[in-house]
């Protein structure tokens, strides 16, 4: 094996090394093997495990009867056949989720039994037409079923973990309402911890919990996990550094909440101020990353395009795509140099797990010379920059890249 470079500080930690025998480097199956099967289905997760993923990643939303299920979003028409079920025509509505009006069908308006009557479909049919042959075959899995799958597949020395994300936690806890107008008023973090405890899946080597919001991670660290007697690693996800804001910050500022009570010493560390329009870039500095490590976070999950230094053309293209509602992975990176946040994070003792690597041409990065890199080279290059894990839609390619990088 070759030694991993340490340009930006130690690339592994004692916690990371204990997770597996791959020098602490992990492959995270983004929504399962979503490059090959409809995302967030047991078959997608099962295939990811067969392809060598260390962790499978479910995004979590809640049902009408309080069960966590794996869906990309609480609006389910893009990932299920709900629109084809005439019995559910009356459930179609418009809701404001994280400040954005969305029309469709929402998981929180369906019982688990009703959701189980639906079937999954490919969310990106234009990008992945081959996956459409699996439309209609798979049910929506519960979080408990995903955990049980990971547990069953952990055998013969193989350990498979789960890497759940709480989706829209402020919406579900404070703003969201069911179709009948009643408040949802549900803590996704509380449900998540309860499920893991019930499934006896609380080994911190087998779980990461991630969120784009800050407050719910603080709640997990300060109250929910201690109350349950568990201590699991938490990962702060980052939206676009220049365009996005953690929604809990926006909500709490506009609600006139006591920010010091919620965020503690974060407020004075923000250069411009903890405001409703604060960007994720304010959370990418050394002082803030050190505060995160001291208070709740074991790692960060930046978008890969922000982690890589890009030309002004690429940055403006990224902002334009975001303004038009473009996908978070549409910009092209200039691989070879990293944003200072990587060095800051590693020096603070945080693990860094960028998202999302995809094999389709639209999502591949370019070198400084303008050459498009195959996905395996992109993944290997990110490991070489010092990251310890990758979110990837094609886990087999991530597995191969790690193997090649480690020389074994």
Image: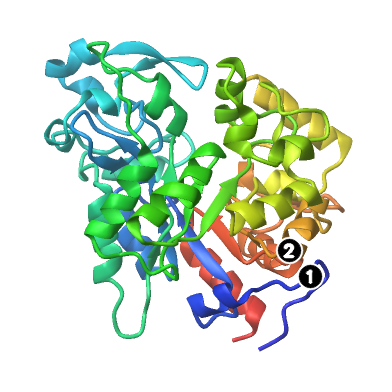
Q: Position of residue 279 (x, y in %)?
A: 72, 30
Q: Secondary structure at mark 1?
A: loop
* Residue at 54% in and 68% down: 26
Judge left or right: residue 190 versus residue 285.
Answer: left
User: Which labelled disc corresponds to residue 175?
Assistant: none
| Up/down of 334 relative to 9, above or below | above
Element on which disc 2 rests: helix
| Residue 375 shows in the view | yes
Residue 392: image location, x then y, percent: 53, 55
| Above or below, comparing residue 156 to residue 90 in the picture | below
Label 2: few (<14), some (14–19) or many (≥20) C-alpha neighbours in 10 Å: many
Q: Residue at x 56, y 73 (%)?
A: 15
Contact, CB < 8 Å: mark 1 with mark 2?
yes
Locate residue 3: give its quadrant: bottom right
Q: Is residue 304 left or right of residue 370?
A: left
Q: Is residue 297 shown above or below 273?
A: below
Location of mark 2 (residue): 346
Q: Evaluate whether residue 334 shows in this view.
A: no
From the image, tell me which residue sits under label 1: 9
Which quadrant: the C terminus? bottom right
């Amino acid at each position: 094996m070759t030694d991993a470079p340490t340009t930006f500080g130690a690339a592994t930690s004692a916690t990371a090394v204990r997770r597996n025998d791959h020098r602490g480097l992990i492959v995270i199956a983004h929504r399962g093997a979503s490059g090959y099967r409809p995302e967030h289905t047991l078959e997608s997760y099962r295939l990811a495990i067969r392809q060598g993923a260390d962790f499978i990643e479910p995004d979590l939303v809640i049902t009408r009867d309080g069960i966590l299920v794996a869906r990309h979003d609480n609006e389910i028409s893009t990932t299920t056949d709900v629109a084809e079920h005439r019995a559910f025509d009356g459930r179609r509505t418009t809701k404001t989720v994280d400040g954005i009006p969305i029309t469709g069908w929402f998981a929180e308006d369906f019982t688990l039994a009703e959701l189980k009557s639906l079937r999954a479909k490919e969310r990106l049919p234009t990008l992945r037409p081959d996956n459409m042959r699996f439309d209609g075959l798979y049910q929506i899995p519960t979080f408990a079923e995903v955990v049980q799958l990971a547990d069953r597949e952990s055998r013969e020395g193989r350990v498979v973990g789960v890497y759940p994300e709480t989706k829209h936690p402020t919406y579900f806890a404070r703003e969201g309402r069911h179709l009948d107008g009643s408040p949802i008023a549900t803590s996704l973090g509380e449900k998540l911890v309860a499920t893991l405890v019930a499934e006896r899946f609380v080994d911190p080597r087998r779980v990461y919990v991630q969120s784009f919001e800050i407050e719910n991670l603080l709640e997990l660290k300060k109250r929910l996990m201690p109350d349950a007697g568990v201590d699991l690693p938490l990962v702060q996800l980052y939206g676009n550094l220049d365009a996005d804001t953690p929604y809990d910050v926006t909500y709490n500022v506009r609600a006139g909440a006591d920010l010091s009570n919620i965020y503690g010493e974060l407020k004075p560390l923000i250069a411009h101020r903890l405001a409703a329009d604060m960007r994720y870039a304010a959370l990418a500095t050394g002082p803030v990353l050190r505060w995160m490590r001291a208070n709740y976070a074991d790692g960060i999950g930046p978008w890969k395009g922000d982690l890589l230094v890009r030309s002004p053309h690429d940055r403006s293209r990224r902002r334009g795509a975001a303004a038009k509602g473009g996908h978070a992975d549409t910009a092209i990176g200039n691989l070879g140099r990293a944003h200072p946040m990587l060095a800051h994070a590693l020096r603070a003792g945080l693990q860094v797990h960028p998202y999302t690597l995809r094999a389709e041409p639209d999502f591949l990065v370019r070198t400084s010379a303008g050459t498009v890199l195959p996905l395996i080279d992109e993944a290997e290059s990110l490991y070489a920059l010092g990251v310890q894990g990758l979110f990837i839609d094609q886990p087999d390619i991530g597995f191969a890249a790690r193997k090649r990088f480690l020389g074994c």
